[in-house]
Amino acid sequence: MPKLIAYTLDGHAVRIRPASPDRDWMDATDQRYAYRCLPLNIANAHGWELLCPSGFSARWDGLNHKETIRIKPDLGTDAPAVSHFGHGVLTFHVPCLFRTDPGFDLFVTGPINRPKDAIAPLSGIIETDWSPYTFTMNWRFTRSNTKIRFEQGEPYCHLFPVERGSLERIEPETLPLSKAPDIEREHRLWSEGRNAFNTDLQDPGSGATQQRWQKTYFRGLNPSGEEAHADHRSRLRLKDFVSKD
């Protein structure tokens, strides 16, 4: 069974959880239609999130030295982020050392599909199957003189293992769709069905209006109705980190 271990530094604590598929902005869409996009849902939940131990606000004045980010922790707390690199980069020190199975790295990025105004997460890939070094999670301001805020319990980091070298083994190529007649046939069925469905949506009494959206991809079906793949996922069920002192 593959392992992902978080060795917490002595004297520190880490809050980590399976990433949630839920997003406030998706909740606010009409009839929550954003959740109909299965690729979005799967990406949202594809890994684990580190959570802020306390809330704070920060502002960058647009200059490059470290002192140009001003950080204000919530009353009675210490801010979990600092200005370490300058150039508008806000740094979270991750208080644990991760270990993956041999041959696996750790992809570290910001919370997926969770945009934040005036600041953006930076991503990294770390060889956590051997590295004895901790890492930082960094965000870079995208606009100066704008206050940003992280709430207590808000995700500030998203991570998941990736197999080292897997991309380098891939041999990419392009081909005309006509070279794959089975795929071309299913795509044509989808395109024709999609156009007809969108047209029927204009009729309040149509079956398309009652159905609201086409669910073939969500259900793992081809447009012809055949099961596309037995390993289709409509939801991820990641395990919680278990404390073993």
Image: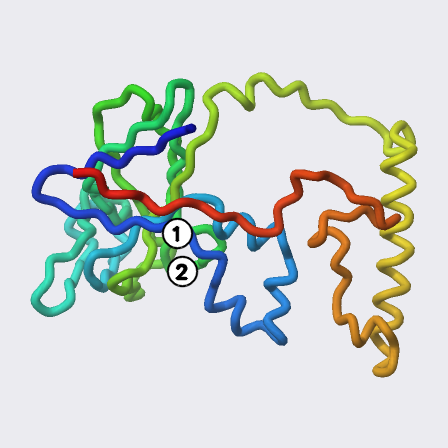
- Give the label on residue 30, or none: none
Where is residue 26? Give x, y as percent: 53, 66
| Residue at 55% in and 18% down | 168
**Whether residue 139 is situated above or below residue 30 in the rendered picture:** above
Label 1: few (<14), some (14–19) or many (≥20) C-alpha neighbours in 10 Å = some
Q: Amino acid at mark 2?
A: Lys
State the residue at coordinates (66%, 19%).
Answer: 171
Q: Residues within 10 Å of mark 2 (few under 14, many from 20)?
A: few
* Quadrant in the picture for the C terminus: top left
- Tags 1 and 2 in contact by the CB under 8 Å rule? yes
Instruction: Give the CA distance from mark 1 to mark 2.
Output: 7 Å
Report the residue marked by disc 2.
116
Q: Quadrant of residue 116?
A: bottom left
- Which of these two is toward me, 43 or 83? 43
Q: Which mark is residue 120?
A: 1
Residue situated in front as seen by the camera: 175 or 105: 105
Left or right: 63, with 10 as reference point: right
Secondary-structure class at tag 1 = strand
Q: How is the image coloured?
A: rainbow
Callout 2: helix, strand or loop? loop
